[in-house]
Structures are given as C-alpha cells and as structure tokens.
Image (tube, grey):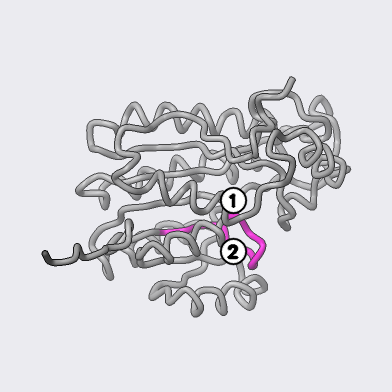
Amino acid sequence: MTAATHHPALAGKKALVVGIANEHSIAYGCASAFRQLGAELAITYANEKSRSYVEPLARELQAPILMPCDVSHAGELEAVFERVAKDWGRLDILVHSIAWAPKEDLQGPLHACSADGFAKAIDISCHSFIRMARLAAPLMKEGGTMMAMSYHGAQKVVANYNVMGPVKAALEASCRYLAYELGPQAIRVHAISPGPLKTRAASGLKDFELLLNEASERAPVGELVDIMDVGFACAYLATPYARRITGGTVYVDGGMHIMG
C-alpha cells in the first residue's frame, strides 16, 4: 500500500493580506497561518514609515509581492490589484485588516463625533473593503474567500469603543450583503470578530487595558486570544473544509461574546 501524499490545506492558493503594521498585527497572524498551510502571499504596507517593520516580515514569509497601500491615497489600492493580476492572474484569499478614525473622534463620545471624522472612519474602515471586493471578485475566477476584521463593539455597546462601533456594524452588514451578491460566483465573505488583542491599532482606544483585563476574566476559556488564533481560524475559513460557510460574523474571542 502506498502512503498518501500530504498536501497543505492552502497549497497553491494566492492570498492578499492588507493591514500588517508589525509582528503584533492580526493581519500578520493571518499571513503567517496562510503561509504555514502552503499559500503564497501578497502583502501591503501603509506608508514608508511602516515599510521598515513590514518588509522583514514579508521576507520571512517569502512573499513575492510587497506593495504600498494607503486606501485613502487615490490609485494605491488599484495598483496592488493590478500587480496581483499581472503576476498571478488570479486571487483566492483576501484579508482586510485596516481601521482608522481621527484621534479626537475615536476617543470622544459618539454624539460629539465630527461629520468629517465619521466620513473618514467609514471610508477607511468599511468602504475600502467594498472597494477591495469589487477589485478582487474578477480575480477569484474559481471562487475564493474574503475576510474583514470586526469587533464585538459592532454588536453590543463596548465602553470607549465610540465611533468604531457603528463603523464596524456597517462593515459586518457589508460582509453579509457581499456574501449574498458574490455567492453565485463561489466567493464566500466573512466578518471576523477577534477578542481584544494588544495591537498598535487597539492602543488608540481609551482605557484599552481595561478591555483586555475584562476579556481575560470573563471569557469561558479564561485567557486572551492571540494573533495566531485569529490567523488559523481565517485559514480554516479559506479551505474547502469551510466551503458552505459564508456571510456570518465569526467570533475568535475565547467565547467572551456569549457572556451577559
């Protein structure tokens, strides 16, 4: 009897990961998990300052595509997808892990949020995923998986999450509608809701340490999740094992969201 040949679950897949800032980023956990399961990576960095942190990670993950992508700069997002189309001709996995709001709007109460701040938060944190989906769908010729990072503050009020609550709620709704629209093309769309993590983006939230402490105390598993927990959950969703799962919000939070 000949031994079965083992193929990594994502062998041959092409994955674009947007949102790595450093080795603590959720997006890096996703990229690392994809790579461990055999995928080839395209990675972006926000600006020249972040490039110094992201470039060594791209080398470590053997990513053949590394490009700048500030979604607020005209043309940068389109250039990334043009490169993917030129080099690969297709795309199987897309991860959107970016969020931003002006500090004064992020740290103040929602009722004090400026119209301009809200518009920027929605554009960068939500509408950019819709734009990515529009660019990615034609490249997912044999189907694919799209994922966007949310948080429990989209579903329930979390103290000090402020403007990002309604923004993430809009993102989760967008995932549902995209799942419906793209399902006939065998493209699945997921909102991923990790528990609190020590990332650079999260550090901008007021009293974030309190959120971390509460999560570790209240989660049924009794501890915080890490970026690799999120990464491997996303990797699973990108495999054929999850071929009938789409449109929902997938919690990776140690069960904290079930607590009253």
Q: Mark 2–mark 1 contact, CB under 8 Å?
A: yes
Report x, y in % for residue 176.
44, 27
Is residue 134 part of the magenta span, yes or no? no
Residue under pointer 2: 46
Q: Earlier in the sequence, mark 2 or mark 1?
A: 2
Give the label on residue 98, or none.
Answer: 1
Report x, y in % for residue 20.
58, 62
Q: Which residue occupies the foreground of this view, 56 or 210?
A: 210
Vertical side of 175 occupied by 28: above or below: below
Secondary structure under badge 2?
A: loop
The quarter of the displayed image where residue 126 is located: top right
Could you tell me how far apart the alpha carbons at marks 2 and 1 are, in whole angstroms?
Answer: 10 Å
Report x, y in % for residue 181.
32, 29
Q: Residue furthest top?
A: 260
The quarter of the displayed image where residue 111 is located: top right
Q: Report the residue at 30% width, 45% height from top.
A: 137
| Residue 58 shown left or right of residue 196 in the figure | left
Magenta highlight: main SS: loop
Vertical side of 35 occupied by 260: above or below: above
| Residue 54 shown left or right of residue 141 in the figure | right
Q: Which residues are magenta?
A: 16-26
